[in-house]
Amino acid sequence: MVYSEDSNIIFRVKGILEFACQLDNSNDVQSQSTISKSFQGLCSKVSSKNLVFTVCNSALLIWPNTCFQSSIESLTEASACRDILKYIETDDSGSKKLSKKKDKKCSGPTVVNMKLLFEVTEPAGNEAPTLCRVIGRQHYLRMPLPLDFVLSVATDESLAIVCKGLVEALIKQLSDMEEVVLLYRKGSSFLVPQPFHFELPKPMGLTTVIYPAGVAESQLQAVREDLHRKFQLPGDRPFLRRTNAFHFPDEAYKDGYLRNPHLCLNPPNVEDAKLYLVQGVYSYHHYMQDHVDDDGWGCAYRSLQTICSWFQQQGYVETAVPTHTQIQQALVDVGDKEPRFVGSRQWIGSFEVQAVLNQLQGVTSKIMFVSQGSELATKGRELANHFQTEGTPVMIGGGVLAHTILGVAWSENTGQIRFLILDPHYTGGEDLQTIVDKGWCGWKGPEFWDQNAFYNLCLPQRPKTI
């Protein structure tokens, strides 16, 4: 675990609660009331003294509804929540670390993972069991509810406040799940409510939304529109699609690609300059990935894949990042290339990247032409405006090389500029240390470009949609 004194702590609790009820198929109003009562019963259950949070990779148990009780005496309700970190076992020995300065910059907030449990043993009472026989046809329903609720707090917040906030988040999540279950119920057929976390612009921060499992994004358009109004979000870009979900920094990406390596870089030393950077998340695609030996010819393909990954991870498209073969086939389909182009090792350039983005993802692009590399130093205003308004990665091709521009540091007063470059010519493994230290992702001056070669830049435009 990487811990920074300056960052918040995210407490994340996961668990399964079983929802169960008996429905009278002949009375829809009664069934709706029965469902609500069952959810009320679950809210009562999680408000009881039997609720227990267990901290992952730790022997620590917390009873949040008993004026704060824990299995470790030194932790009290007044303890700062960061004190929990001392009791969590970590194993960073096998991980590749950056320098301390960069490590903190890349790590993000600290995440404390917890599990939801209940005490099931209680003192025996004097009550006797009661049997009740009901004659009639009813539908007995059981459904697991996948609870996943979070609370982001300052590191010095008390454990009492944390526990109170987590229980409130749990009860709210059950209420939101009830709303989704009722909205999408068809008779005795229910859709499982699934929680998704989104990091929204301030002051909202980390926010949880419940979506019904199995319902396509296109069918949730009206729901997202309501949420955009509720959270006062812009109406021209996705914030709340499932692919926009917050990625917790302690979880690895399953596809193996690095995300946003530029976040580990320090800004360049350019006097009076402002940073204009790519917005959102992208994957770093480069030579020799995916068991494809494209060393020497595939740099523009890899830059295009990085751009496609951006549109996918921002929720604009649901299609996978295209392979080299799919890129070549798209160019054949639009009439740009002959059929024999598929399977070849031929280069592509900015105009082909523009054509493929339009064909496969419905994304339009602008082309910026520069007659010689020395002119790129004068394009600060245009590039700054692109990253401010569109925020997409830019593919640049010139001579025999292609690169991806992720941002610029530009001074409007002096005209000085630095380019944030993601280099697709890297042939090594997904080693963030090497990629950052060796400059495969880094800030470059105007001299980086061939001063006499012409360049074409492909500037993808965001679709106006949520």
Image (cartoon, grey):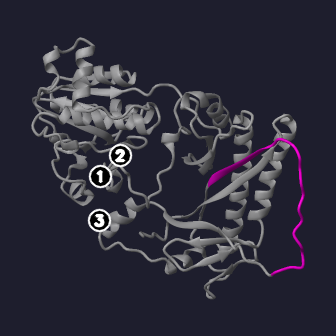
Return the x and y of residue 230 as percentages of the image width and height.
69, 38
Is residue 457 located in the magenta-colored stretch of the structure? no
- State the CA–CA distance, disc 3 to disc 1: 19 Å
Is the C-beta separation of discs 2 and 1 under 8 Å? yes
**79 left or right of 416?**
right
Q: Which of 92 and 232 is in front in this view?
A: 92
The answer to whether 453 is drawn above or below residue 51 in the figure is above
Badge 2 marks a residue whose secondary structure is: loop
Q: Nearer the viewer, residue 455 or 301?
A: 301
The crowd level at tag 1 (other Cα within 10 Å; few <14, some 14-19, many 20+) is some
**187 left or right of 113?**
right
Q: Which amino acid does label 3 sit on?
A: Leu
Residue farthest along the bottom direction in this orientation: 73
Badge 1 marks a residue whose secondary structure is: loop
Is residue 137 located in the magenta-colored stretch of the structure? yes
> At x 55% / y 77%, what residue is drawn?
84
Q: What's the mark number on residue 98?
A: 3
Return the x and y of residue 338 as percentages of the image width and height.
16, 13
Q: Which amino acid does label 1 sit on?
A: Pro
Q: What residue type is labelled 2?
A: Ala
Is the C-beta separation of discs 3 and 1 under 8 Å? no
Q: What's the mark number on residue 273?
A: 2
Q: How many marks on residues?
A: 3
Q: What's the mark number on residue 268?
A: 1
Inspect this view and state whether residue 380 appears: no
Return the x and y of residue 190 as percentages of the image width and height.
68, 40
Mark with earlier residue (2, 1): 1
**361 left or right of 147?**
left
Stretch in magenta: 124-146
